[in-house]
Each structure stands twice: as C-alpha cells, then as structure tokens.
Amino acid sequence: MMKKQKTLHPSSGRLMMMINDLPDVLLSEILARVHSHRCAITCKSVCKQWYSLISAPDFASRFIANHAQNHQKHSLIGVSMGTPVGGSPYSRQYCIRFIGSEGLESAWTHSTSKTFGEKSERIRILATDNDLILCDSWSRKFMGAGSAWYVHNPSTMEWFPLPLLPFGFTYTKAAMSCETLHHQRDCRQGRPYGLQNSGRRFKVLGIGLLTAHYYCSETNRWSEFIRLENQFLTPYTNLVGFQGKFYWTTDVARHIVVYDPSGVGSEKRLCDLPAVGSRLVRLGVCQGSMRMMRKHILENNEFMLCVWEMEEDENGKVTWKLKYSIRSDQMSSQDSRLQSCPKSKMELLQFDPVDEEIVFMDFCDCIVSCNLRTRNLGVVAEAPSHFLPSFNTLFGLSNRVYPLAHPWWPAPLFP
C-alpha cells in the first residue's frame, strides 16, 4: 500500500522562507536579474530594504553585466507629437509613444500640468540623443517668446527645464548632444553605456530663419552664435548633435557644416560630402559613430541607397567610408502592405542608434525598417493618424520621427 505523501501548507513560517529573509547579497542578485531596468526601479517602492539594495552604488553595474551578457540591446523609434490621452485636445495628459523594431512598444503618459503648468496645450519632440528627449511645450502665454524647452529622461521620468528662448526667436531645426559625466563606456566595443550615479552634461542648438542659438547646461543660458546670412549655412536636412558638436548639410547638400561650441571662437567649418549627385540626405548616429545615408535616383523608378561612416582625425579632417550600397530592386518584403507601392516613393528617415545594419524609412504610410545586409523590409508601425498626407508633404515625416536608444540602466540627468 502506497504511503500518502504529506502536504505542506505554504503559510507555515517554519517551512517557507520569505524572500525578505534571504541574505542581502542573494536578494540583490535576484533583483539584478529582473527583465528590465523599469521593473528594477519600480521594485524600489516595495520596501526600504529593496530600495536600499537597488540604490546601492554597485547595483547598476551588476544589473548591466547580467543583461549585457544574456540579452540583446535594442532601440525604439517614436513620433514627434504627444497624443492627448482620451483623444481630447483639451486633455492635460499626453502620451509619447515609442515602438521597437522587434515588436517592443513603450509609452510614457505624463500630466502636462505638473511639468509645464496649467496653460500648456501640447508637447512635441524636437530631438533625441541616446536615451534622452528634447521636447517643447507650447502655450499662448509663450507666444512671441517662443516655447519652453525641456530635456526629458523617460526612464527616470526626470524633466530639466531650459531657460525661455530669446524673445521672437522661431526655430526651424533643433538638436541635442549629451555627455555622461565621469567615465563613459565604449559602446563600439560592445560594452553598455549608461552609468550609475553619474549626471549628464548636454548642449542644445536651435536654428531659426535668420539666427541660431546655443544652450549649455554648464552655464544654463542661451547665446546667439551666428546670424545666418549665407544660404549655405541654412540646414537643408536634419540637424544632428554628436560628441559635443553639431552637424548639418548645406542647401546644395555638397558640404556638411561642423559647429564646435567649445572651439576657439565657437568654431564653424565646412567639410566635403561624398560626391554623389543627390540632395536626399540624412545624417544620424549609430554605435557611437556619425553616419550619412543618401538616396540616389536611378532610371526606371529605382534608386541606390548608400550609407557612409564619418571618420575625423585629431586635426579635424573629415573622411567618409562607404559601409553599404544597395539598389531598391534588391529590397524585398513579405508584408503585403509594402508590395503595392513603387519603391521610388521610399523616403529616408533615421538610423537605428544600436543596430548598424538597420535604417528606417517612410514607405506606404508606414515606418519601415530596412536591413542593409539582408535587404529585407519590415513594417515597424503605421504612420500616426494625425500625420495627414498634406502634413507629410509640407513638413516631411522625416523631420517628425526620432530614434531612442534603450539603455541597460538609465543614467540620471543629475548627479
């Protein structure tokens, strides 16, 4: 006769060890293996013990080490307009939505009245750099004086207000360049960026029709650095911040302007671009390197997509190294939504900041990822409903889509 197995009651204090009874070393190691930094940060609110363990100086480094070894780093791409929660234009809550190329989706809902005041009527993304967002808040009280700009860390929900822009300044392009204070890991060697207990130093550039203004977090003020009297200094494509400098192409897309705010007399110089006869150019940053992609129109409604990587020596001399060159007739997709449109209608959007083989394009009313190695096209997301065709024609979806790196562990804005 089989002996009946004794059933243990889970509530028995002697037979079950509560998780808080674990040694701090073991409990900290368990918390360092949760699936995301958001989950780990949320766990701080469980109890004082968990808050203390997760706030320890060495916790972030162990969390990064665990995830860098077992998980693939990914990025997100988002659209510029915050969507009112509930669909009402009078809503004081806006949702900024970012979508990942692997189906990952993330959104941040924020009450504008808490950060921007009761008069805020909408928020908008102006630029991104790594995992930080530069956004503005428009309201009637700022009319004539521009809008209020903020640097936002969506992982830590920190907001840093910039001083109001000079009276009457209206920008057409904006960019941000951020540096992590203390030491920074080299992401080109496969090591994760984002450091514990380190603040940020960031620079912002806004270019208007006649003037451009520069902001530095160290001085916390705006300064006018140039009057745009030369058509070749007006940005034709996107404005990009990279390693403390700012880059944009000229009106004829034959040169790139490099502005170094820390240089002698705020150095500004022109550098040649690769000699390809096309003005369809996009600049971007991928894996810690400046890149450029160019669309060159061919016959029979086809085009050539070329991607270069910029190399700059210690004397400031710029050279371009060709990384990829593919024809549109080599691209393919299994998605039926992309098979009905001619490929000549593809428009360049952005680089993936993490994966050097991925670029994003606007095609068939969708945000599409293009794998430069496999030539495969995939739909990341359909274009937002508020991006009407007339809006795209006038302003360009390419100036309304922004990449965002998803860090292993977020570095705070403040030390």
Image (cartoon, rainbow, N blue to C red):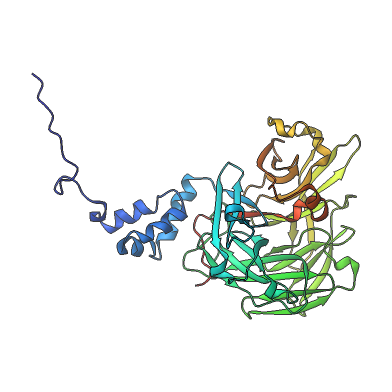
Q: Is residue 27 left or right of residue 311?
A: left
Is residue 81 toward the left or the right of residue 247 in the image?
Answer: left
Report whether residue 309 is seen.
no
User: In this rendering, does residue 194 appear at all?
Assistant: yes
Toward the viewer: 278 or 181?
278
Q: Quadrant of the N terminus?
A: top left
- Residue 197 in the image, given as x and y percentages of width and height: 47, 68
Residue at 81% across, 58% down: 237
Q: So how many labels did they put on this image? A: 0
Tell me the residue at 31%/64% (across/down). 48
Residue 293 percent location from the top left of the image = 78, 50
**Quarter of the figure with residue 405:** bottom right
In this rendered view, identify the residue nearer to me: 110 or 80: 110
Q: Is residue 7 above or below residue 228?
A: above
Task: List x then y, in percent, for residue 301.
Answer: 88, 36
Picture layout, residue 283 above or below residue 339? below
Outermost left residue: 1
The residue lying at 67 percent from left, 44 percent from top is 357
Instruction: Pick the residue in front: 278 or 301.
Output: 301
Q: Is residue 290 above or below residue 170?
A: above
| Of 253 and 204, the residue lying toward us | 204
Q: Position of residue 108 (x, y in %)?
A: 55, 56
Task: Name the residue rendered at 76%, 49% in the picture.
Answer: 388
